[in-house]
Image (cartoon, rainbow, N blue to C red):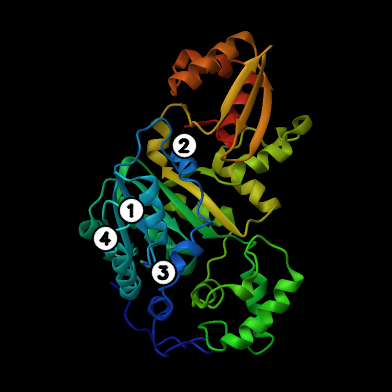
Amino acid sequence: MLGAASLTRPSAGAITVGLSSAERIKQGYERFPYPGSDVAALSQRGGSMPALRWMLGIGRPGSAKPRRVLIAGCGTGVEAFRLRLALPQAEIVAVDFSPRSIAVAQKWERSGKFGRPIRFLVGDLTAGNLRKEIGGDFDLITCHGVLSYIPKPERALVVLATCLATDGALYLGANGAGHPTVALRPWLETFGLTVTGMKEERRLRQLLRLWDALHDDDLGELATMPASYLASDICGAWFNNWSLERWRAAARRAGWEVAGTAVLPAALRLTMDEGRERPLFPAGVGKLSERLDQVRPAGFHRIMLRRAAAMKTSGLAWTGLYTVKVSGGVARFFSATLGVRFEETLTTRQAEALRTLAERKKTSRVAENAWVRSDAGRRMLWRWRALGVVAG
Ligand SMILES: C[S@@+](CC[C@H](N)C(=O)[O-])C[C@H]1O[C@@H](n2cnc3c(N)ncnc32)[C@H](O)[C@@H]1O
């Protein structure tokens, strides 16, 4: 499943010489299973996952709850156990190429505290036979903090596509060009510290305390993170800290299209006062996300992907992420999940069509016509797609 040992020169301080990148990465997770092998890790991490409600609203608008869920790169299982709480009836399969991580997850699983069993399996996301091993037809695949740390993420995107149901969706959480390690790793190296493979933990923490004193980002205090986090997210063997443009290009080559990103609604909302978003029209959700990421490069992307072919044929659908109140020709939208509030002035026809859309959850062509016949209407619908009011 892994590439053969290569003769490439290992980078300074690599854990073991003569190993391929993939083997060094795996070895790192065997030493430090993520997010941890003691039970405290179960409550400590996993908080950076987006809301399941958002994943389903954007990825599978108007569809029933997923029956089959795959956690791709599950580590010691925190993500899988969280999803189990939210989806008690679903069949959940969780895969990781680190046997030690899977063993820890299986140990917690045996405690029987998590309801319907989760199938934890050792498997490589870049292996062509993955579907044969785990089955296909998954309605939802989540892959959080995994593809940033593997040398050929495109390969995994191709393999995951083979595991998906036709109307399924993939949540991808991956490092962005604004990730702190872009500056942090070269900076640590200027102190003579080895950043590929965690060796001098005490010195690393000392330098991170200095870094923390100068930074105030949403990653919190790096110096206080558990060793398993530092080994992976700071001293890992491989990093893809990519712009959204680059992740999108890789995803498109594998036949995926961006259905939404977690920051897009709030980012677009920031531009909306006095119609400042107009120059962005009519870029679709994927292109729009790229453009906004170029201005404010994210540290970590939360991206919903769907099969490009399925997106072309699916109609407009209500995501259920907003509540809306219409009075006096003004519609007021609010989403607690996204933390976004905005309003629109509607024609009488649009107000009626909006009611139909929100109540029936899916649009009829007649309702859609209330927007597509005028330039202002088309722009409104375009905003609603980006804001996550509708999808498809
Ligand atoms: C940073 S951890 C994230 C774990 C989990 N998704 C979470 O957020 O808690 C990355 C995980 O990806 C796994 N991984 C990396 N490359 C992989 C591959 N090619 N196939 C399967 N798992 C892989 C590692 O073993 C590790 O457990």
Residue in front for this viewpoint, 228 or 353 = 228
* Nearer the camera: disc 4 or disc 1: 1
Above or below residue 311? Residue 35 is below
Question: Which of the numbered marks, if any, corresponds to residue 70?
Answer: 1
* Nearer the camera: disc 2 or disc 4: 2
- Marks counted in the figure total 4
Residue at left offset 32%, top offset 59%: 94
Question: Mark 2 highlights which residue?
Answer: 57
Tag 3 secondary structure: loop
Question: Mark 3 highlights which residue?
Answer: 39
Q: CA distance from mark 2 to mark 4?
A: 27 Å
Tag 2 secondary structure: helix
Residue type marked 1: Leu
Q: CA distance from mark 1 to mark 3?
A: 22 Å
Ligand 1, seen in the image, is in the quarter at bottom left
Percent from the top left, x then y, of residue 318? 48, 27
Q: CA distance from mark 3 to mark 2?
A: 32 Å
Residue type marked 2: Gly
Labels 3 & 2 near each other (Cβ < 8 A): no
Residue type marked 3: Val
Above or below residue 29? Residue 269 is above
Question: Mark 4 highlights which residue?
Answer: 130
Residue 123 visible within the image? no
Mark closest to the chain's N terminus, 2 or 4: 2
Mark closest to the chain's N terminus, 4 or 1: 1
Mark closest to the chain's N terminus, 1 or 3: 3
Residue at left offset 62%, top offset 31%: 334
Percent from the top left, x then y, of residue 333? 62, 27
Mark closest to the chain's N terminus, 4 or 3: 3
